[in-house]
Image: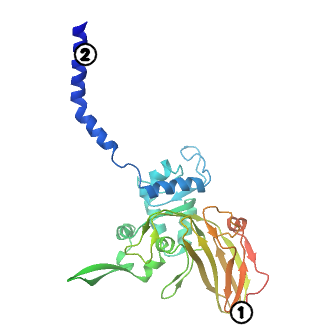
Amino acid sequence: MVEQKIGLVVLFAMVIWILFPGLQYLSGLSKLPVGPPQDIYQTLLQLKQLSPEPGDFYSLHEQPQYGILANWSFGRWINYIGHRPAIADNDGYAFEESTRFFLAEDEDTANQILTEKKARYILVSDFLRAFPRYAAAIGLNPATYVEMKTIPQGSGQTQLAVPTERFYSLMQTRLYEFDGSAIKREKWIPALEHYRLLYESNTVLSEGRPRPVHWIKVFEYVPGAHIIGKTRVEIPVSILLKVQTNQQRIFSYLNITRSDMAGNFKFTVPYSTDKSVASIHTSDFYLLKCDTGFQQVQVDEEAIRGGKDIILERACE
């Protein structure tokens, strides 16, 4: 009996001795970071809270009610952390469509892609360094968007990527760098009419950008309400709304147009002013400016989601 116990102890010790290097290796692995960076993880948890249930998107017999458009590398994280259906995934599915969306130069083209793919939410992330590769992948010439210029640096020189005017027309730039608001360049680039910011992550990027930007942003694609009014013939008309994000950052959603030869104008706006979207705060009204005149316009969430017309009874002078 004693000899049997001694034999078992020796056998157990040999097993531990054989497995010890492997156990050390596994212990080391357990200390390595796994999963997505914290900004992405928290964004996907928030996305789950901000969005309705899409249905059983794992089912072979039914289609989800909507999808999430993001860079393909986010695909599995969106599915397994956010529990939402990713349109583009890590296997390359819809890579071209998602890339064409972010590199579209007009809103109509981007909207068509989202409509065809039944997308409702868009995750936008840093695209700057990878931009040349993605542009080339869909047959675009990166040099028409970014010019390389040589500038002095210390005792030598360095290459600096300088965006061209076309770069500012990209959906990626308009959403990520400017929150969908109008951009003043050589000529005004109009605001995006169907995209509202819902959430942005903690980390701020600033190096080599037009302005500091939060790393991950979530936008919702909405029909938008149509503000229709009348003013003097062929004059500039602008509309402005202050928006405060979940990070307490305040930006202005601004759009600009001109009245036509009959004095008519129209804006499609993506934000409601009735405080019904919990993740952001807006001012109590849009401020409409027609030449030297001002007018306040309130928009409810029903009008945004229903694509309803808001016809101004009083002319904007």
Q: Quick one: label 2 or label 1, which is nearer the N terminus?
A: 2
Residue 17 picture quarter: top left
Question: What residue is rendered at 24% in x and 18% in y?
Answer: 9
**Residue 214 x/y as whole percent:** 47, 67
**Residue 254 x/y as whole percent:** 59, 79
Residue holding disc 1:
232
| Residue at the top extreme, as displayed | 1
Q: How many marks?
A: 2
Q: Residues within 10 Å of mark 2 (few under 14, many from 20)?
A: few
Residue holding disc 2:
8
Q: Residues within 10 Å of mark 1 (few under 14, many from 20)?
A: many
Q: In the rendered structure, which amino acid carries the disc numbered 2?
A: Leu
Q: Answer above or below: position of 315 versus 103.
A: below
Q: Answer above or below: position of 172 versus 186.
A: above
Residue 274 picture quarter: bottom right
Question: What residue is rendered at 33% in x and 47% in y?
Answer: 32
Question: What residue is rendered at 49% in x and 72% in y?
Answer: 171
User: Which corner quadrant holds the N terminus?
Assistant: top left
**Residue 165 x/y as whole percent:** 44, 83
**Position of residue 125 in the picture relative to residue 31 (left or right):** right
**Residue 3 x/y as whole percent:** 21, 9
Q: In the rendered structure, which amino acid carries the disc numbered 1?
A: Arg
Which-is-in-front pick, marks 2 and 1?
A: 2
Question: What residue is rendered at 60% in x and 62% in y?
Answer: 279
**Position of residue 247 in the picture relative to residue 207 (left or right):** right
Q: What colour-coding does the image apply? A: rainbow
Q: Is residue 250 visible?
A: yes
What SS does tag 2 mark?
helix
Q: Is residue 86 visible?
A: no
Residue 234 picture quarter: bottom right
What SS does tag 1 mark?
loop
Q: Answer above or below: position of 212 versus 246.
A: below
